[in-house]
Structure formats: structure tokens, C-alpha cells
Image (tube, coloured by chain):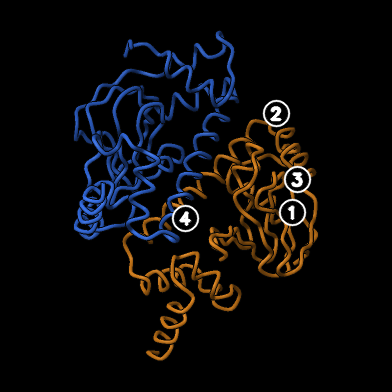
Chain colours: A orange, B blue
Amino acid sequence: MNFDSKDFLKESLNKMVQFGDEEIKPILDVFTLKKTKKKEIIAQEGKIVDSAFFIQNGALRLFFSEKGTEVTGNISTEGEFLSSHESFFSQIPSKYNVESVEDCILYEITTANFLKIASNNPKVFQVAMKILEQRLSKARETIEMLVTLTPQERYERIMKDNPEWINRIPLNYIASYIGISPVSISRIRNRLFSEK
Amino acid sequence: MNFDSKDFLKESLNKMVQFGDEEIKPILDVFTLKKTKKKEIIAQEGKIVDSAFFIQNGALRLFFSEKGTEVTGNISTEGEFLSSHESFFSQIPSKYNVESVEDCILYEITTANFLKIASNNPKVFQVAMKILEQRLSKARETIEMLVTLTPQERYERIMKDNPEWINRIPLNYIASYIGISPVSISRIRNRLFSEK
């Protein structure tokens, strides 16, 4: 795969809202390539986040600190957009940090450029709506999982839905994401592996 | 308060995105008054939901059925918009029911009318984005609460944030909304009341 090409970004945008080739060009133009290292913090809690990221390769997570421990609010991988959305769209201080879970190849768009291209083409707002809608569905699924499933069932669900996470995402990130203590999640994983 | 006036709706829209008086008129025009009775189901799980509701007066909830019990996914009151958003915007079957928790006075907008007014004025997309953004923030707060707080802390938080719910929202709706069994929530409430 040519990681410097915007073909994957273009394809992902077109999946949400159909654009013509000429129409999508100025949109793709405002995205800039950004390469990050594993564990690099690319947006900080308490500051205004004025970039959103399309993940060409790698994984990002949103997290915040609570009583000295980190709580993961979101994990995103290839083909997904991630930002601290409230901060990006409303320019208020972010409640979250954004961290590279792996070395990443990202395409970055600033709030100012987002507003510029959206004022020229309202379909850009529809893309943003689609992303928010997908995030909201995902957040609702997480809530449902938290209120209806046992810790073991949550772990099984998340691993069924995201089998590639097992080798890519540290277990303690997954633990706080699904509301389980690091000790419990290790126990659950060991039990599941010994059953196989 | 004149319940049949669209002043409150107008004010709520203007809080999200500023409109001129002439500009907002065609937007307000597509909202139609709808009065519903307590316990009335106004949108159904499994069907396409093609209306969104602005709550002029009353309370609505989103819920779904899981293993024979109802799980409340959202509770909204005066000044808020509610729909089964994924279904409303993407016209896919809804995962949720929408129910009147009280007798309600609502203003309803259909998906077709939403798309019509948005194609005439892209600021309407910005309103929709704002609503999705607020929903997403609320969903993330719920997730945070579920993974970081004990059942009693969750109940205290929800009552602090929404003190009017105590007289308006049945306790079992609140229970499933914050992932507590009906028995536990009664016990927590009794304990808190006896401490006062």
C-alpha cells in the first residue's frame, strides 16, 4: 500500500457521502500527512483541540485521567476518524487526551480548514454528521454493553467485534474501556485461554 | 407560557446556531405540534423512525428490550431534541423505542422536511451536528459514570445533575439508565433518604 496516497481517505469519505472527483479534490487538499510514534500524545486534556485525524495506518485512543488512573474512552483504527469532537467542533477545552497506541500514519484536518471547506460545500457538514452519528452509535453500544453484560461477556464481545485488538491494544486500555479492573481482565483472559 | 407558540423552539435553535428572523421562519414552519399521552409509544424498535421531536413540555425516553426487560438509553426533557438518531438520519430500522414518560407537548420534524430545509440552508446541518455533538457528550459522560463510579455514586450524580427527575421519572427507568437493578436502586434511595 502506498501510505502517502490519499486514496484510502478518499474512499472512506465517499462511503459516507458520495462526492464527484472534482468536488472531492479541494477537500482532500486540506488534509496533511502526520506520522506519529507509539505512545505520542497528539492532543491534550484541558487544551483546545483544533485537529481531527483520519487513521491511514495504526491505532489511536482517547483517554482521560480519573483519580490518578487513565480511563480509555475510545479506541480507533484504520479507516476511522478521531478527535476530541466537542473540542474540535466547539473549540472548548478538551476532556480527553489523544494518544498513538502504535506508530501511526494519519491525515490531519484543522478546525479552520474544516469550516472553510464546509462553507464551500455543505456536503462536508454531512460527512461530519455521519461521523458524529457513528460515534454516537458506538457510544450507545458501549453503554448497552456496560449495563447489560457481565465483565466476562463484555470482554468476549469486544474481542469478537475487534479480534485484531488482542495483538495491538494493551490489555489495560481495553480494561478501562469496558469498565473492568486490570486484575479482573487478566483473570478473565487467562480463564478463557485455558478453556480453549 | 403559550404552549402552542414556537418561541421556545426558536430560542433553542438560536442557542445552537444564530439565525436571522427571516431565515428561521421556513425552518420553524416545518415543525408541527404533537401532543402525546403518558406512556404513549411514538417511535418503535425495528421500524424506521422518520421523525425527531423537540420537547416543549414533558419528558421522553429512549429504550430497548433486552432479555425481556426494558433498558432506558436516554431521558430528555424540556428544550431538548430527541429521536432515534441513527434511524432518523440514515433511515435504517431503529434499535430503540421512544416513549412519552409524561403527557407531552412536542414539535415534530420529519426526515424529509429536515433534508428539504437543510438543502436550502446549510446552517440546518450545523444544528443537527450540534445536537449529535451534545448527545455524544452526554453518552460519553454516561460511559464515564458507568466505568468510574459505584452504583450509589451514579445515583447521587444523576440526581444532582437532574434534581427534577425525582418527581417525574419512574425509578426503574433511572435504574436501567445507570446500570443498576431495580432492587439495588430502591435500597440506595432508601439509605440516602434515611441519612437525611
Q: Which of A155 and A45 is in front in this view?
A: A45
Q: In this view, does B10 lie above or below B97?
A: above
The reply to whether discs 3 and 2 touch (Cβ–Cβ < 8 Å) is no
Q: In this view, does B191 lie above or below B161?
A: below
Q: Which of marks 3 and 1 is nearer the N terminus?
A: 3
- The chain under label 2 reads A
Name the kind of residue labelled 3 in the image: Leu
The residue under label 4 is B144
Name the kind of residue labelled 1 in the image: Tyr
The residue under label 1 is A107
The residue under label 2 is A119
Q: Whole-Å distance between the Cαs marked 3 and 1?
A: 9 Å
Rendered location of residue A195, percent (x, y)? 37, 89
Q: Whole-Å distance between the Cαs marked 1 and 4?
A: 28 Å
Task: Determine crowd level at label 2: few under 14, some 14-19, many 20+ residues with C-alpha closer than 10 A.
Answer: some
Q: Which of B189 and B39 is in front in this view?
A: B189
Answer with left or right where residue B23 lies relative to residue B142: right
Nearest to viewer (mark 3 / mark 2):
2
Rendered location of residue A120, percent (x, y)? 72, 29
To the question of a shared chain for discs 3 and 2, the answer is yes
Rendered location of residue B99, percent (x, y)? 26, 37
Task: Determine crowd level at label 3: few under 14, some 14-19, many 20+ residues with C-alpha closer than 10 A.
Answer: some
Answer with left or right where residue A79 lies relative to residue A120: left
The residue shown at (49%, 13%) is B26
Seen as rendered, the residue at the extreme front is B196
Q: Whole-Å distance between the Cαs marked 3 and 4?
A: 34 Å
The residue under label 3 is A28
